[in-house]
Structure formats: structure tokens, C-alpha cells
Amino acid sequence: MTDNKLRVAIVGSTGYGGVELIRLLQAHPYIEITSVISSSSSGVPISDGFPHLTNIVAKNLDGVNPAEIAQAADLVFTATPSGVSAKLVPELLAAGLKVIDLSGDFRLKDGTAYEQWYKHPAPSSELLEKAVYGLCEVFGDEVKGVDFISNPGCYPTATLLGLIPAINAGWIDPASLIIDAKSGVSGAGRGTSLMTHFAEINENFKAYKVNKHQHIPEIEQVLSQVSGEPVTVTFTTHLVPMTRGIMSTMYATLKGSYTEEDFIGLYREYYKDRSFVRIRDNGVWPATKEVSGSNYCDIGFAVDARTNRLTVISVIDNVVKGAAGQAIQNLNLMMGWEESLGLTFTPVYP
Amino acid sequence: MTDNKLRVAIVGSTGYGGVELIRLLQAHPYIEITSVISSSSSGVPISDGFPHLTNIVAKNLDGVNPAEIAQAADLVFTATPSGVSAKLVPELLAAGLKVIDLSGDFRLKDGTAYEQWYKHPAPSSELLEKAVYGLCEVFGDEVKGVDFISNPGCYPTATLLGLIPAINAGWIDPASLIIDAKSGVSGAGRGTSLMTHFAEINENFKAYKVNKHQHIPEIEQVLSQVSGEPVTVTFTTHLVPMTRGIMSTMYATLKGSYTEEDFIGLYREYYKDRSFVRIRDNGVWPATKEVSGSNYCDIGFAVDARTNRLTVISVIDNVVKGAAGQAIQNLNLMMGWEESLGLTFTPVYP
Amino acid sequence: MTDNKLRVAIVGSTGYGGVELIRLLQAHPYIEITSVISSSSSGVPISDGFPHLTNIVAKNLDGVNPAEIAQAADLVFTATPSGVSAKLVPELLAAGLKVIDLSGDFRLKDGTAYEQWYKHPAPSSELLEKAVYGLCEVFGDEVKGVDFISNPGCYPTATLLGLIPAINAGWIDPASLIIDAKSGVSGAGRGTSLMTHFAEINENFKAYKVNKHQHIPEIEQVLSQVSGEPVTVTFTTHLVPMTRGIMSTMYATLKGSYTEEDFIGLYREYYKDRSFVRIRDNGVWPATKEVSGSNYCDIGFAVDARTNRLTVISVIDNVVKGAAGQAIQNLNLMMGWEESLGLTFTPVYP
Amino acid sequence: MTDNKLRVAIVGSTGYGGVELIRLLQAHPYIEITSVISSSSSGVPISDGFPHLTNIVAKNLDGVNPAEIAQAADLVFTATPSGVSAKLVPELLAAGLKVIDLSGDFRLKDGTAYEQWYKHPAPSSELLEKAVYGLCEVFGDEVKGVDFISNPGCYPTATLLGLIPAINAGWIDPASLIIDAKSGVSGAGRGTSLMTHFAEINENFKAYKVNKHQHIPEIEQVLSQVSGEPVTVTFTTHLVPMTRGIMSTMYATLKGSYTEEDFIGLYREYYKDRSFVRIRDNGVWPATKEVSGSNYCDIGFAVDARTNRLTVISVIDNVVKGAAGQAIQNLNLMMGWEESLGLTFTPVYP
């Protein structure tokens, strides 16, 4: 039955990104998952740890063996922690596999910056160069036909999609950017710690890694590229007592006299061929639940004439558009398929 | 484009059942929604009140006019409050439409019992007789080819699927049944009240309508039919601080010496041709999140040799299997299609 | 038994501010609540609507009658909606009562600004002038001995306590202020609406009233007074799926070269005689749960040398320090008592 | 300043039971906490791990050294895991300390049953005999003047207070008892595991340890003692996506013809001198939030004439009445003080 289907393996199948890839790929017409892989739990049925997959995915978890993966699959998603991808991806590429990496290891072109923010040794500069940064709505054309894609981070996806058209148009001052970001707890992964303990985060709202989050250089790298000048941002991350969802609330000083309607028009034009970005009407702002379970990024605006500032509000489901969904969107673009293939899920509401 | 598709209208599109029908039907290959109907909000785009539908459903809400509905559609889902369906459904049937009613108005065959529990005048006994009770896994054969289906309640669905095989086999005493049920808040509907106020129900767990819930006679009617004797149950409903999900924890005295494995075998056999019921292995019980967003009903067992009692744990997503999903499953059966058509959603986890 | 106690009445006892006053005043040694008042529910026991008060407060709710209140009490808290206080407070003052008003009606000295932001007719300018704005840690001295206090808003309390020492010291540029504020749902009050419906806000994060919140002019009025120049702020409010808590994340451009330690020292000095403000150590930021149920305001800092900006994070329990707790603190100061009297609750954790 | 105060040490200060003891004891007039003890974190300020205690408790955590504890304190609360208390308590008693143990290690009089349910070696039978089981409202008289109290479990407290008056009166059949219990996540402790991971339990409801929970023999031991015959119960535990609160929904067959009013009268009489048990009026049932943060146990009833069964609903805050609050209540009784001393907290609502 696999004759006409792309055979796909998923490394890191027991993390939230991996298990969401499995959920979404059930609906993809051209894909067959041939191996679900976990370094920690190989040999047992994946439905033991994820009973929601009972009767849906019957496979046992496989171990991490690049040669075996290359036998079983044409393409591999690496939903592995940063540091792990850096070591594993070169072996997978060497084994002849196409790779879409969901970690942060290949997003920064500058290895020195990587080591400063990630505290791991950087991958080779050759590989950093080779990795195509797959922010689909902006760099979708560059992804077509390549073998190796670095999938954007969750915060950068919400943030960059919300800022790039305005930066690109020169309507806001890149030096003025302040990004106040909020994420559901699934963004911290499935690992257990006090930070993800229910009793600690329920009925709680907290900031973390203020000015220190490793997604800062990723955002700055892309904004610098788009604006043509070095951009430095103020960036705060917060944890929200919910499972899924990211909101970036972003502030910038206007470089001219623009209204909300101007921005709405600008963004709708910029994203006019992109089905996963939805621009809200004037006076309405998106909430995270309105994209939950889906691959949408929804964006709204407020212009404050009193302070001459723009506020942009951008929301995604961090596990979908911020991870597994965008990875599949990248796969579609890489293969030359319609980018929305298998991804046309209506958000789950309420 | 509608030549080969069944044209469907949804009355009550701005309630949670209605809007979930819209979500699920996006994925159904043989259906086209031709009218979304709301008595309270007609004339405005449905995405105004439900921004998650932006760019997905472009329609304006229509008013409730049976003649117009019959022009636009072949079949209508009535996701209307009890009391409203009782009046509207006869008109829709008279206009030549097929009807699947999601309210409680046509579930009880005994109009007197209806009036006692629902406090409304009962529909005509002729219509009560005509309505086929669409608990798909049990009465699926009776639904085929009919024009009018009464979709089961959320609590009865979780409860009956968890009890019927054991009652049918005569392994448990029907006189001993105690049902402790718990529901997420979406079960209370989208109407606003103190009972659904976030600050009142968040970080709270409460019982309501103890021994008074209108789903009691529905459960008793079916269990009496299955067991061949009048069955009376003790039934408590609780509100859980979550949006979706129902769990019925059910207790019964064993009529013989049976193990968990016996019940697992019995249920797997009973549901062997039914893809939406999943029986857990011994020592594992389902949680509501494991079916969230999907049409599954998952069931687990514990036998306590010390007390000679069986505990059955049954979970569903109340908005899907407990409402919109089962309604579409009934539509599939009614039309003679595969019952899982358009419903093969993997649960959303986490 | 009331000979030595101040007799207190509470108008608006069935709102969250009113019922929290009742909770907190149970622990106050010098106060007796002599009347709990509700315009909507008079005549029934308050514990009917608030069963948590069973056996604690035996009173029936009284109606709103200034002459009767003046018979029963020496001082009245008006925890009434904006617009209602504007009409009621003059009558209560005229009846000889001391008044602490928790609404927004007497916070703005400029009646025109009030009408612009609140959309109600402003109270008389004489009364606006008479009302003392009770931000205790800043204007505590002005409250002593007065008859009429306007209690600050919840967002302004968290925001102003987090900004005033830095503004006062001239270390940050008032023209650069951006305030990203987040509140639990109790801040929206006990009234029912879709905005407070559990299924709509649970597992959701949303912005509202962007640049339009009526607390903006209150913040600007005080910051202008402190800085000696007109201050205009960018201010965004968000709703968090939790019941209690406010966080203000605030951004400002530094006017010199200051470190986190500089700000920690500055704030600890500014608040050194104030027991309810706690300044976090370097590298640690407060979370809302760390003040839940208590009258504390906790504050932390981050300086970003890369962007020359300060980030201030300030948290309160909106129902306590943002409403009922600060009102009692104002009462203590007004009466010349220790400001922490009856308010030394340890935060409830977890 | 400690001359007139009882000096108290808390072992296990970094667990939820320990840190709640600290919160509650801040309000106790006769107690001074002289040592907060943690085997894992000694040497650091307790407010490092619990910032909500900043400026409230300045102490560093001490290590576990019975001789040093005996120097510093007169009485010690052991809020330690089961298995740890069994070893530590004998040493503390030998060092001359009074002990109130919050673990399950000394609740069962039968060491064999302990080993079967807890899977640890039992303490000596001498110590099991010596430990007085401190269910205050039932065995309060036995606690007076003793040196060693075993504090009841959280589920047993809610369950036993809800059943004992009816069992004692002979109005219900002990052989018919079915207990469906639900707990907030704090009941699982502060240890990290998938079971307490926010993304796994939020928007989820799950059963666990069905018929296997170690609180079963504790409940049966007391009910057997009260009824004078061996009692075996069916007992299911569930995890609710909230932090605090337990509800026990309990079912029993009536042994005569009794109404709700009969039970209300019976229970109010039984608990008439006990300020922490509140019996709801007919037709109203308590919710967990109505006791949150307080030492109350609230109880309501429903009689179903159709099935001849009683439903009892009993709620507590598991961290207060189910742990730290009842431990302090036991301390008060042990010392001959008013049992409510330092415990008259109004529930935090909402």
C-alpha cells in the first residue's frame, strides 16, 4: 500500500511535537508513517504511553538507528531536544534521508550565537548553511526541492508572521520592537519539572527567561534579514495556565501616519496566497482558542494615535503551527505539493 | 458543485452542538452545508460570533423558516434546546426534510415521563413513536433508511455504551446500578449563567441535579429494553472544571464470578465491528483527554472480589460522541454509508 | 459588643469585591460588619448566594437606603459598579458616613476625562476634588483622617507600584512606557457574559480593550503627577484563564546606565516602611500565585543592556490588593491604625 | 518572645502539607515555629523555593536531626512520605518530642494490612497501638493530652465525616457502601511525574488506583469500629484538573424510610459542638470551592425514594482539613485549647 506514498519516520515520537506529527499525518493523503522512534522507550507499543492512539497507531516504538531508518523511510522528522538534533541530523543526512528538524539546532546561521544562547557546541557551519529556515509564509519558495529544513521555533513563528509585513514595508521602526509573548505549558515539553507541575502553574501566571530566551537570536536573525539592518528586540516570555497556544503582543513605533485599516490591507496583501494566515477586521483581536488544534496564525492590530505606536497581536497553536503543523507544511512545500495538504483542520472550539 | 453531495442545514448553529457539527462536517466528503441557521442572530456572518471559522465558513446565519430550509437542504440537524425541537421538528418533517434532532425532545417514548422530567408538553405520541433512537453501536441497524433520528444524550451515550454488553449478558444485577457521572462545562451549553461563570467553576468541583437529571429516564428506558425488566438507576451528575469530556463511573453487583478479562473479552466481542468503541486492557482506565475532539468512547473495568462489584469507567467527548459526532455517525448509517465517514479524527493530545 | 468597634456597612456585598471585604474583615480586630447590602437581592441570607459564608455571616442582605445605613454604620464601603457609585456616594456622605469607594467614579480629578473613558456623566467637581486617591504606599499620608477615599483600580495598583520609584528617581523615560497587563477572570466581576463563560475563556488567552481600557487615564494621571510632566502610556489588557491575579509587565527606556541591583536597591529603599511591597532578588520574577489571597504586591526587574530597556514585573491579587485588601488598608490609614491590621494573610500556595 | 508559646518544628517543610502548616500557623496565637526542616534542601532559605513566604518566614531550612529538633522544639509535625515517618517518628518520640504525623504510617492498627496496602514494612505494633487516630470530630476526646497523634488521610476525612453519623445511627446498610471520590492535584504531592504534568491533567479527568488506594483500609477500619461489624467498601479515586479540594460522593442503601430532612437533623445533632462541619440545607449540595483554603467539611444529602438509596456529598480542602488544618486542630485538642484556635479562616471565594 506504500507504493505511492512517501515513507516517513519520526524521531522523538513520545514528545509533544512527535505525537502531534502522528495525529496530523493520519489525515495526510500522500504520507505513510513507517517508523515511530524513541530513544527512551523503544520496543513497546506507542499506545502504551499515549492511549489516545489506541486502534489508530499499532506500531511499537523503534530505537534510533540511522541505517535502519534509511531502510524504512524516505524522510525523517527529528522532534528531538536541542543538542540531540545537532548530533543526529548529520548521520541521517549521510544515510541519504531527507530531514525536517524541529529543534533549534539549525536555525541560527551563526554558530557562535548558537553556542551563546543554547549552551551547546554548534553544528558544523556547512550544515548550518545547508539548513533552509522553513518559515513557510515568508521563505516558502526557498524550501522547494531541498533535502534539509530547519523548522522555526514556536515563539518566532507567531512573532515573525506578525511583524514581517510591517518591517518589510518600512512602516515601523525596527529599533523600537518590544515583544511580550505568552505560551501554554505544552511548549515546555513533556519532561517533568516543578515548572510544569499542575499545582504550581494552575491558577498562576509567570514570566521566565526574561531577555534570555533562546528564541531571541532566531527572531533577530530573520528581522535583520528582512529589514536589511541589525535588529535587536526586547522579548519577554510568560507561561499561561493552559495547555496549547501562544500569543505574541508586539509593540513598535510608527514611522509614519498609518491606521489599523492600512495595516489590515498591507497584511492581507502580503499573505494573499497563504491560506494559514488570517487577518482580523478592525477592532477585533484574535484569541488563542480560535486557532487551537489548527495550523492557523491569526493576527490583529491596534494603532494608538496618542502614543504613535502600533500593537500587533498574533496567535498560533504552538504544537501545530509552532511545531508539527508547520513541519508538515514544509514537507508539502519541499515535495512541491499544495502547502495545506492534510492540514485543513478547523480549530477545535470550544 | 453540490450535485453529488447531500445538502445539509443546521438549526442552532450558534450553540456548541451546532458549531461542532460545522467543524466536523468540513471533513465529510459527501456533505455540503447549505444553510447555518440561528433564531437569535440571523443575518450576520457566523464567523462574527465564532472567529475560529474565519475563512472556513463564509456564510451568513439564516433565520428559522421550514419552507426555505426545505428549498436549501435535504436534511436538517436540529441542535436546538428541548422544547424548541418539539415544536420545530414536525414542521421540518412536514416540509419533506430528513431530520436528526440533537435535543432530548424525542428520546423518551413515554410522553408522560417526558413531561415529568422535562417540564414541557410532550410531542405527539405518533412522532415519539416515529423517532428512531440513534445509539449507533446498539441500534445502528434500526437507523438505516429512516427519515427521523433522535440523537442520544451525552450522559446516556457514555453510560449506555459502558453498561449494555454486561446487562445484555446478564452478568450484572440491573437493580444494583449506581452511576456517578462527571461532565465538562460545555455540556451546559453556551448560555450564560452563574453555573458557567469561569470564576465560579474554575478550581471547583460540584454536584448538580442529584437524582433529578432529565437523562435518567432515557438511560432507564434503554436499559429496561435491553434487560427485559424495569430498571431504575441512581444517577449523580457533577461539573468538572474543564471544557470537554464526560466520564461515567458505574457500579454494579456481579451475578456470577467474573474477572476483568472476562469483561474485556465480552465487550470486545460485542463491539467488534464498531470502530468508535475502544476497550482498555486490564488495569488501565481511560481518561477524558484520550478521546478529546474525537468520536471515540473508551471503556475500562475493575472487578473488586472483596465486594463482588464491577466498576465500569466510560469516557467520551460530550460535544462529539455525545452530540455532533454521533449525529453524523447516525447520518452515515441512515444514508447507508460507512459509519466512520468524515469522523476519523485522532484525539487531540495533549 | 460593638462599643469599641467601628461599625461598617458594605454596599455591593454580592459582587466579588464586596464578598472579599467580608472575608477579610472577619480577621480585623477593630471592625464589626453591621450591614451587608445588595440592591438586587435584599431580604435573603447572604449565605444563600455564597454558601462559603455559611455559619460565618448569618446576616440577611439589606437594601440600599442611605438613612438606614447611617443608623447602622460609621463607615461604608461602596463596592458598586461605576455609574452607581457616582450617584450613591454623595447621599452617603451627606448622611454623615465615611466612605471608601471601590469603583472608578472618583479616581479621575478631571470630569471630562472621566466622561470620555467611562461614558457616564461625571460626579461633581467638588466631590472629585474631595476624594483622596488611596494608593496606600504612595499617598498613604494623604489618607489619614479624611472621610472619603477613592480606592485605586486593580491594574493601576499593580502598574503604579511597579513604576513610581523609577519614575520618581528619573531613571526611566516616561515617554517610553509600554504596559502589557494580564488579569484573571474575577476582574471582570460576577456578572454573566460570554466573556466570562468558562468554555470560552478556559484554555484560552485573549486581549481586550486594547488602548481603550478605562484604567489608562488613572495610570496617566498619577504618573504625570509623580513625574511633573504629562505622561501617555501604551496599555494592553489580557484575560488569563485563571480566577485571581494580575501581572503588569512594563517596559521603559533607561535614562542612564543602571543595573538590576540598582533598581532593587532603589525600590527597597522607596518601600522600606511598607510591609505589603516585596522586591524580588536579582534574576527572579514574581508569579501571580505567590501573592494569591494576600495583600502583597511583588516586583522584579530585568535590565537589557542590549536594548537599554528596563522590564518591570509586578503582581497582585486583583481581588485583595487590587480591591478589598487595599480598601481595608486605606481604612486602617484613615483611622490612624497600623496599615497591616487584619491584613497579614500569608498567600495561599499552591 | 517564645516564653509562652509552644515551640514547633515541621519536618517535610517543602511539601504541600508542610508549607500549608507554615501558612496556617502564622495565624496561631500560641505557637512559634522554631525550625522548618527538609531532608533534601537544608541550608537554604525556605523562601527560595517558596517565594510566597518572602518577608514572612525568614528561616533557612534545617536538616533532619532528632536531637537538634528536640533542642529547638516541643512538638514536631512530620509531613513526610509514608515509609519515612515509620522510621523517623520513633526517634522523635524517643528524643522526648510530641509528634503529630501526617503520613499514613500510623493510621492502621493492623501492621499486616499496612504492609499489604502500603508495600513498606510496618512500624512496631507497640507504636501502632500508641498512635491516636485524630479524626477530630469523632475521636477528639481521645486526643486530649496524648503525645502522639496520627493525622487522618484526606480521602478518609471527607468520607468518614460524611458517613459516620448515618452508620452510627444504623440508618444505612454498611455492606452497601460505594464511595466515588475526586481530588485536586495537590493531593498527589509536589513530586514531579507525568501524573502531575500540567499538560497531561489540565482539561482531563481520570480515575486511578481503582479499588487499590491505600486509604481504603483506613476507611474500613474506622467504619468497622463505628458499626461494630466488618465493613468493606467499594472506593474509586479520580483526579480533577484543579489544585485543591476533595469531594466524596457516597452511596448507601437505606435501612428504613428516611428523608433528607431526617439526615440533616441527624448530622446537625451529631456535629452540634463541632464548628468545622457544616450541613447544607435540603436540595443544596456543597462544592469544593466553598471550603477552599479553610478547615471546613461541608456535607449535603439526597434521598432517592425510587431506589431507596442515600447519596451523601462531602467536601473538604485536602491540604487544610485533609492535612495541615486538621493537624493543627489535633494540636489544639491535644493541648486542651479551643479546637478552632488559629483556624478560623473564611474560605477563599472565588
Image (spheres, coloured by chain):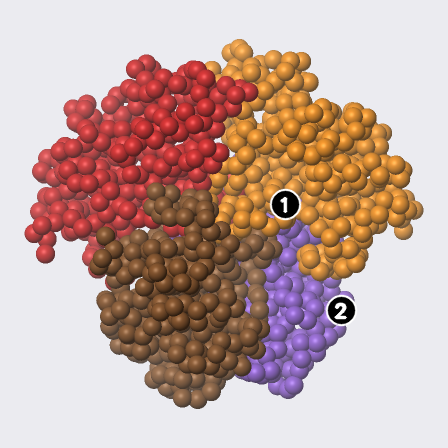
Chain colours: A orange, B purple, C red, D brown
- Residue drawn at the location 19% of the way across and 41% of the way down: C338
Compared with C146, D200 (above or below) is below
The x and y percentages for residue D217 are 49, 78
Secondary structure beneath disc 2?
loop
**Of the numbered discs in the image, which one, if any, rests on residue A189?**
1
Q: Residue D219's image quarter?
A: bottom left
Q: Is residue D119 above or below residue B322?
A: below
Mark 2 sits on what residue? B272
Q: Disc number at residue B39? A: none
Q: Are marks 2 and 1 in contact (CB under 8 Å)?
A: no
Q: Is residue C19 visible?
A: yes
Circle 2: residue type: Lys
- Same subunit, labels 2 and 1: the answer reads no
Density class for disc 1 (Cα within 10 Å; few <14, some 14-19, many ≥20) is some
Closer to the camera: disc 2 or disc 1? 1
Q: Residue at x 32, y 17 (%)?
A: C227
Q: Which quadrant: the N terminus of chain C?
A: bottom left
The image position of residue A129, as x and y in percent, is 79, 25
Residue A270 spot, x, y in % from top left: 67, 21
Give the Cα distance between marks 2 and 1: 36 Å
SS at circle 1:
loop
Residue at image x 50%, y 19%?
A: C308
> What residue type is disc 1 on?
Gly
> Residue B115 or D187: which is nearer the viewer?
D187
Pinpoint the chain carrying mark 1. Answer: A
- Against B223, residue A259 (above or below) is above
Residue C40 visible in rendering: no
